[in-house]
Image (spheres, grey):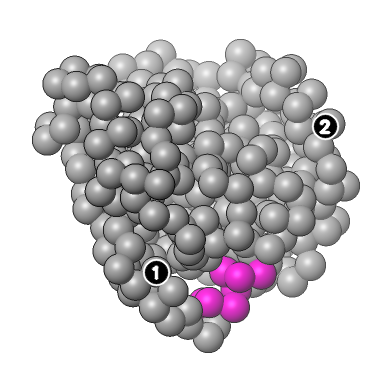
Amino acid sequence: MLGRDLTSILDLSTEELAHVLDVSLGMKRDGAGPMLAGKTLALVFEKPSLRTRVSFEMAMRRLGGGAIALPPHEIQMGDREPVRDVARVLSRMVHGIAARTYAHETILELVEHASIPVVNALSEDEHPCQALADLLTLRERFGDLRGVRWTYVGDGNNVARSLAYASVKAGLHLTIATPPDFALLDADLETAGALDGGGTVTQTTDAHAAVREAAVVYTDVWASMGHEHELEGRKEHFQPYQLNGALMASAPADALVMHDLPAHRGEEISDEVIESDRSIVFDQAENRMHAQQALLALILAETTPGA
């Protein structure tokens, strides 16, 4: 069992993070069985989704349970009824909530008013489930994560923040390369640096220097969902950080490529790179299901609605 909720990678201790990865690997290899038979997960989404919806639904099915997708036009959370009422109603009927929201405060409000577990399936502050899938992907490739060097190139966004926290807890050495005005905050780095686990996080504006010793190079979109209107103004800043053949030429010859998808080919990553033999982006995508399967099994096993 883990703590009741997962709002952030910070909610997992170093030992719990390793345990989730161990269980994920075991379930991916051996299957899980109907550990959550009769249990239902509500998927409360404010944003469109492919990987998040399918991976959570399939994880629940593989565990013998079910999922109910609640898109924004149906429940109109925060408009048709308050977030706190949504949390209370769902707590009487289902066993857990996975929420994909804009504001991180919405996740925290669901946690405050729900009597069942709440999982952050994405917010503008963090993307902890993506980080779990990414670490699982690295575990499959490298075995022991401790000491592995990887580089994130692009926007200092929710994915970068979760990767920073997860890297320190897992013993990885992460370098983040961003345009000067788009880095993670000093407070984020201070939080990461204070964590147990032995990993490190550094930031730079030099993308080519950042990838020179990287076993993996990771990127994400230049403007997150809901901020697409900022893209045109960002392109000039981010073009030198495109993950393309020229940038990968500065990395070791065997460096792998990761992207959490969806990819805007020709913007943050070139078609040449994402389609290359180095790319493991679809391993990442599949591992969303396996990592979340383990997470849900550990969180929901003893949950009862209305308790």
Q: Is residue 286 magenta?
A: no
Residue 99 placed where, x, y %? 36, 39
In primary-sequence order, the first of circles 2 and 1 is 1
What amino acid does circle 2 point to?
A: Gly
Residue placed furthest toward the bottom: 30
Magenta: main secondary structure: helix
**Side of 51 relative to 70 (left or right):** right
What residue is at 87 percent from the left and 47 percent from the top?
198
Residue 151 placed where, x, y %? 69, 44
What amino acid does circle 1 point to?
A: Leu
Where 184 sits versus 48, above or below?
above
Residue 36 - label: 1
Residue 88 - label: none
Residue 193 - label: 2
Say which quadrant the N terminus sits in. bottom right
Q: Which image quarter: residue 192?
A: top right
Of badges 2 and 1, the one in the foreground is 1
Q: CA distance from mark 2 to mark 1?
A: 36 Å
What residue is at 73 percent from the left and 47 percent from the top?
13
Q: Which residues are magenta?
A: 22-28
